[in-house]
């Protein structure tokens, strides 16, 4: 089996590096300065235990890969980039190549299933940072991440078992879980705070805003009849498998949305996190002012390439209270 890691930023870089170091056949698909740096000197992979240049093969586009028929593609790009990536992949590999959506949110699998026959969901708990081209930081001690998987929307098969076994062999905790989408919905609720952490500094009001976003999400999922893993079940799955640990010489940065603002990418994932709750609210008649506001502010700051954490919490609260 050959693994294609499509979208080799923080999460994809960690998965690719762990597989490569475990002598698994793996190729990255990356872009821009990040790709150029990997091709020039290898991926600089920094963890609490090591700092090493990993010479992983990397290309810029699926058409540069000679698909042999034994590939598994793990999608690790942010959701706003998924649709274009799927179109490129389908043209290069056809619609039968198996995909695993190792991404936040719950929209990627549906995008993929419109185009591909063999789509799988993969939950991702994996703290990773990409700020500098060619360098990925992983602050996880013990296990490198938790990557359970299923057929989408439910079920399991021999491929899920084989893929999770390969990931287990290179220091991930990965299990077949036929109902892994329950956990992806639970992770979605957890990720609603990403936008707030990206656009505003910490403060007492942040906890209240996060609690409001969570309450809105839970009300939406109840109205929609969505089975969502509760926090206690999520925490029980992770258990003591992953612990945060320092990487020598590196400060701990923020989450994926903060990284998008810090790198000035011009886009952010809020439409598929907070925006997913806004969508459910509109479909089922549930007010979602906190999620609408954070979606709006995150997109505005990203489009204007504004400074992370530059919107005061008082202004966030003011705008939430103004949403009708």
Image: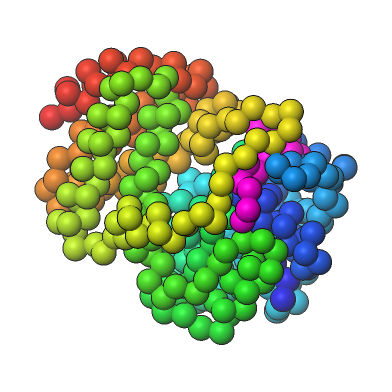
Residue 209 painted magenta:
no
Q: Which residue is situated farthest in the front direction here?
A: 240
Q: From the viewer's perspective, is residue 298 above or below residue 8? A: above
Please give left or right for residue 105 compared with residue 82 in the image. left
Out of 211 and 256, give the one closest to the viewer. Answer: 211
Q: From the viewer's perspective, is residue 58 above or below residue 154? A: above
Q: Residue at x 32, y 26 (%)?
A: 206
Asked where in the image residue 166 lies, by quadrant, the reply is: bottom right
Q: Is residue 35 visible?
A: no
How far from the left and from the top, in percent, is residue 146? 54, 59
Please give left or right for residue 31 compared with residue 263 in the image. right
Q: Residue at x 38, y 29 (%)?
A: 196
Q: From the viewer's perspective, is residue 211 above or below residue 219? A: above
How far from the left and from the top, in percent, is residue 168? 63, 68
Residue 135 painted magenta:
yes
Q: Is residue 206 visible?
A: yes
Q: Which residues are magenta?
A: 130-143
Out of 39 and 163, give the one closest to the viewer. Answer: 163
How far from the left and from the top, in percent, is residue 2? 73, 71
Q: Residue at x 26, y 42 (%)?
A: 214
Please give left or right for residue 100 compared with residue 41 in the image. left
Q: Which residue is situated farthest in the bottom direction here?
A: 158
Asked where in the image residue 29 lies, by quadrant, the reply is: bottom right
């Amino acid at each position: 089996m050959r693994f294609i890691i499509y979208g080799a930023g923080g999460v994809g870089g960690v998965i690719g590096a762990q597989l490569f170091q475990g002598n698994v056949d793996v190729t990255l698909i990356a872009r821009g300065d990040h790709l150029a740096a990997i091709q020039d000197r290898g991926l600089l992979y920094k963890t609490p235990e090591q700092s090493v240049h990993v010479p992983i093969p990397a290309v810029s586009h699926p058409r540069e890969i000679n698909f042999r028929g034994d590939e598994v593609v793990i999608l690790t790009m942010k959701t706003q980039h998924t649709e274009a990536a799927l179109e490129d992949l389908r043209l290069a590999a056809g619609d039968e190549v198996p995909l695993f959506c190792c991404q936040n949110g719950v929209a990627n699998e549906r995008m993929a299933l419109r185009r591909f026959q063999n789509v799988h969901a993969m939950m991702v708990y994996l703290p990773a940072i990409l700020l500098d081209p060619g360098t990925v930081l992983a602050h996880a001690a013990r296990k490198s991440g938790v990557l359970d998987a299923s057929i989408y929307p439910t079920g399991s098969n021999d491929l899920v078992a084989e893929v999770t076994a390969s990931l287990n062999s290179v220091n991930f905790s990965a299990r077949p879980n036929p109902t892994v989408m329950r956990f992806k919905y639970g992770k979605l609720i957890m990720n609603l705070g990403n936008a707030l952490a990206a656009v505003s500094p910490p403060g007492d009001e942040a906890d209240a805003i996060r609690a409001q976003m969570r309450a809105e999400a839970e009300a939406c999922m109840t109205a929609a009849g969505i089975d969502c893993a509760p926090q206690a079940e999520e925490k029980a799955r992770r258990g003591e498998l992953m612990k945060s640990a320092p990487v020598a010489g590196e400060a701990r940065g923020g989450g994926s949305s903060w990284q998008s603002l810090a790198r000035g990418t011009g886009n952010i994932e809020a439409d598929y996190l907070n925006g997913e709750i806004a969508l459910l609210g509109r479909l089922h008649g549930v007010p979602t002012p906190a999620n609408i506001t954070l979606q709006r502010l995150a997109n505005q700051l990203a489009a204007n390439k504004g400074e992370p954490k530059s919107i005061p919490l008082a202004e966030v609260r003011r705008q939430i209270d103004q949403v009708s």
